[in-house]
Amino acid sequence: MNDRNATREFAFRIVNVFAEERLAGNPLAVFENARGLSDADMQALALQFNLSETTFILPSNIADARVRIFTPTFEMPFAGHPTLGSAHVVRALTGAPDALALEMLAGTIPVIAHGDVWTLEAKPPATREVGASREQLAAMLGLAVPDLGALPLWVDTGSEQLVIPLASANAVRRCAPDAALVARHGGVQLGGGVTRAMAYVWAADGPQSILARFFFPKHGAIVEDPGTGSACANLGGWLVATGAALPQQWSVAQGEAVGRHCKLGLAVDSGGRIFVSGRVIELGRGSIRL
C-alpha cells in the first residue's frame, strides 16, 4: 500500500462531566491514545468535534497519564471538566486506582474518585485586581451597578479568569453580556499570541448553594459554557483571597440558561486547599480514521 494512502485509527470516548443524568453536564471528547497525532492534528480534531474542549491522552513519566487540552481554536494549560473526564477514561483504560495524577501544561493535577464522582485539587490561587470599573463591568454584563456584589478579581488556580460576584441569583439569571465589552474587559493573554476573554458570575442561591454562569465571546457573539470546573476552582480561590471563613463547601449549579444542567461541588478546606468535584457519565465510543 502507498504510505500516502494509509489510514490511522484513533479511538475516542464521549463523556458528560458534572452530569446527574446521561444527557446533561458538559460534554467532552477524550482520545484514548494520542501517540502519532501532531499538534496540528489535535487542534484540527478539536475543531472537528467543536466541543468546548477535546482532550488527548499520552504516556507520562511523572504521572498516571499526560493530558493535552484543546478548544476548537487553541490549547489550554488546564481546565476542570477535561481533567475529571480524562481521569475517568484513564481509570477505565488502565485499571488505575481511584487516586491518580494527570500531567498537564499547568502542572501535575491530583484527582480522586468515589465511584463515578471525581474530585480534583486545584493549584493555590494567584490573584490580581480588576482594571475595569464597576460601571464598566455592569455594562459588560447588561446589568445595573447595584446588581454587582463583592470585590471582583482576576483569579488563577490553573487558568486565569475574571470572577465577578453578583448581588443575587436573580442578577445572575438576568445577565445579558455584550461580546465586545467582554472582549475588552475580560481579555487575558495565554501565551503564544493567544488572547482569551471570559467572565464568570455567581451568587448564593440558598444555603450552601451557588448559581453560576460562564460567558466568553466567539466570532463576535457570546457563548455560555454549561459547566466550568476551572472557574469553580477560581471561585474557591476568590474565597481564599478575600479572607472568607474556612472551611467552606458549596454545591454550584451551572448550565440552567443553556439547557445543560451541571452540578459542581466546591470545597475549600481549613488550610485553603481547593477541591472541585463532579459526576462523569460515559455516553459513547467511536474512532476517527486519518
Image: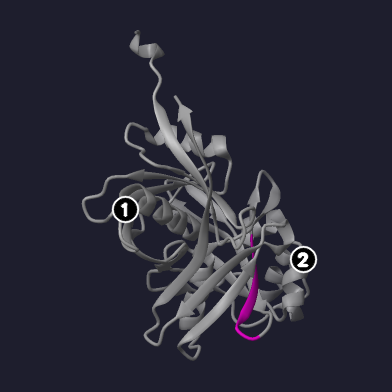
Q: Nearer the viewer, residue 10 or 40?
A: 10
Nearest-to-viewer mark from 2 and 1: 1
Identified at 45% across, 87% down, the residue is: 247
Identified at 69% across, 46% down, the residue is: 220
Question: What secondary structure is the stretch in magenta mostly built from?
Answer: strand
Position of the N terminus, as image quadrant, is top left
The single residue placed furthest to the left in the displayed view is 61
* Residue type indicated by callout 1: Gly
Classify mark 2: helix, strand or loop.
loop
Spatial CA span between label 2 and label 1: 48 Å
| In this view, 122 is above or below 59 | below
Q: Residue 15, position in %: x, y?
A: 52, 50
The single residue placed furthest to the bottom in the displayed view is 245
What segment is highlighted magenta in the picture? 207-214
* Residue type indicated by callout 2: Gly
Taking the magenta stretch, the answer to whether it contains residue 213 is: yes
Identified at 35% across, 47% down, the residue is: 93
Q: Earlier in the sequence, mark 2 or mark 1?
A: 1
In-image side of 194 versus 60 (left or right): right
Q: Quadrant of residue 253?
A: bottom right
Q: Tags 2 and 1 in contact by the CB under 8 Å rule?
A: no
Q: Residue 136, position in %: x, y?
A: 69, 69
Classify mark 1: helix, strand or loop.
loop
Task: Please give the residue where the numbered disc 1 appears in the rendered image.
Answer: 95
| In this view, 17 is above or below 2 | below
Q: How many marks?
A: 2
Give the colouring mode of the picture: one colour
Q: Nearer the viewer, residue 109 or 95?
A: 95
- The answer to whether any part of residue 167 appears in the image is yes
Task: Please give the residue where the numbered disc 2 appears in the rendered image.
Answer: 142
Mark 2: give few (<14), some (14-19) or many (20+) Cα within 10 Å.
some
Taking the magenta stretch, the answer to whether it contains residue 281 is: no
